[in-house]
Image (cartoon, grey):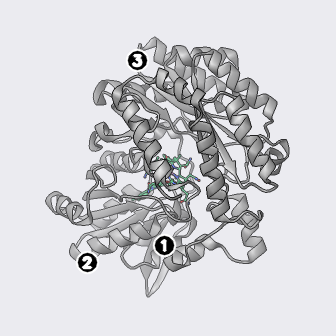
Amino acid sequence: MRVALIHCPFEHRPFSENIQVVDKEFCLAPPIILAYVAAIIERAGHTVTIIDANALRSSKEQALKSIQRFQADIIAFRADTYWFHRTVEWASFFKERTAATILVGGINVSLYPQESLAYRCFDYGIIGEAFRSLPLLLSGLEKGLAPHQVPGLAYRSEGAVRCNPPDAEPVKFDEYPFPARHLLPNHRYSSFTSQRKNFTIVLTNTGCPYSCLFCAIHKQPFRLRSAQNVADEIEECCRSFHIREIDFFSASFFIDKALAMGICDEILKRKLRVEWSCRSRVDEVDEECLQKAFAAGCRKIYYGIESASPSILSNISKNTDPKRIRHAIEQTRKAGIATLGFFMIGAPGETRESINASIQFAQELKLDYVQVCRMIAKPNTCLTDQLVQHAGSDPWREYILDQHCAPDALTPWTSFSKAELLQEIKRFYREFYFRPSYLVRRISRTRSWSELARYVSVAAKFLFQSV
Ligand code: B12
């Protein structure tokens, strides 16, 4: 079978938690999930291509030409909830113009399988892991498909959507083939804070043992890779794809200290010349691990700080406190690693005073960067569970069924309006990034003209664009 995987372009949505400029500028990351799916397909003996229409800025018409040249039997998409209707738009376009079978997988199909397959542009959906289901589906399509035999398959039969139970056998993360980066335009990717190309993202674990109210990641199985396996992928990135900067994209890199230190040891032992960043909770780092991370190439850590208010941190089940936050940031700076703090505005219990305190706190911490969003009830989070209980319906399910039902405020617990929260976010950024002391520090640490040009361009967009 010949399978074309499409990564549709995406941009800011009105219900996004971020202001526009952040959604547009923060990261042009590789569609690594599709690259995993591509590797699974290749390993099963099929031919696959990835069209990253987002990075290539391709239109539907241009993507169609590539698909026709490739002679795809199957066109496949990954759908998340935010971008579901864009996926439907693209899938419908190809459905009308090709004879290919159209397949959809990914988180939104797992959350809302019936609703997703209600769109007739999709012939099949895969609920849950593609690891075993997808090779079974492809060989079935080649040799004669018995749909009820493919775990996790969503399909139409006698006018109804049928959903097989997903593959229940857990897949160890080390069993996955490495993402098929040979199918990606690696030179295109970057993040706002990245310094070197080629840039990519790597996952060291999935899931999370914590259960912050605003996050959905703890609802996925918590799986760790081995240090050896991660290092083999990093080595492949460096040697085969000339990647010089990596962002470890898992929710927390240091969640398992032994794994994090093992990865650092392997990078040092193999003499891999790569700079990297990662995400972490503040209560998972110490002096020793930060020093080793720096020695192994860590140059930035993105910490989930969220708020300066102990009562808000408790309301959202974050399980941290300002003292611990301060300590982690100081230790990180001492180790020579730059810091980015993620903050959220509009949590349960937020007041104008607590927002001011967070802005003040971010400045006192001497963070190198901040990213601020509004706290909203994202799909599959405890906040959405509460919202469903309270309102009796799930706004995300309604949105999947009808794009005109786009969720709006998604913050019933606060008296701040969406517009007020967005203005407060803008104020947070302004008071943080436009301080003279910060500007002097940033410019003195800028390593190239292109980096400086990127900052100036984003600053201009920030000042002159609406939220
Ligand atoms: C890496 C990542 C990204 C990467 C790569 C995404 C990509 N398109 O490949 C980047 C940075 C680009 C990204 C962007 C965004 N992301 Co993201 N991302 C993740 C992250 C951290 C890891 C996912 C991962 O690699 N899993 C490992 C793979 C192997 O497992 P998997 O995802 O479960 O995939 C398996 C199955 O789902 C299935 N499958 C998946 N896709 C497909 C496709 C086909 C055809 C088939 C058959 C099967 C299949 O098979 C896979 C392998 O077995 C998750 C959080 C998490 N921990 O899961 C969020 C997550 C998926 N992202 C999320 C969001 C919201 C976004 C953004 C909308 C953010 C934004 N505001 O812009 C954008 C959307 C961009 C887009 N349209 O892709 C949400 C989605 C929630 C939802 N219900 O929609 C998640 C769950 C995080 C969260 N907030 O909860 N993301």
Q: Secondary structure at mark 1?
A: helix
Q: Amino acid at mark 1?
A: Ser
Question: Which of the image's four quarters has the N terminus?
Answer: bottom left
Q: Nearer the viewer, residue 375 or 273?
A: 375
- CB atoms at circles 2 and 3 under 8 Å apart? no
Q: Nearer the viewer, residue 419 or 412?
A: 419
- Say which residue label 1 marks: 116
Question: Any atom of ligand 1 within 8 Å of the CB at mark 3?
Answer: no
- Say which residue label 2 marks: 96
**Horizontal placement of 316 versus 58: left or right?**
right
**Horizontal placement of 444 versus 342: left or right?**
left
Q: Give percent across and percent down for residue 397.
A: 59, 73
Q: Amino acid at mark 3?
A: Leu
| Residue at image coords 61%, 15% | 335
| Residue at image coords 14%, 59% | 69
Q: Give percent across and percent down for residue 252.
A: 62, 36
Q: Nearer the viewer, residue 264 or 314?
A: 314
Residue farthest to the left? 69
Residue 301 shows in the view: no
| Residue at image coords 69%, 29% | 365
Distance from Cα at disc 1 to Cα at disc 2: 18 Å
Q: Give percent across and percent down for residue 77.
A: 38, 61
Q: Amino acid at mark 2?
A: Glu
Instruction: Name which of mark 1 and mark 2 comes first in the sequence.
Output: 2
Question: Any atom of ligand 1 within 8 Å of the CB at mark 2?
Answer: no
- Say which residue label 3 marks: 272
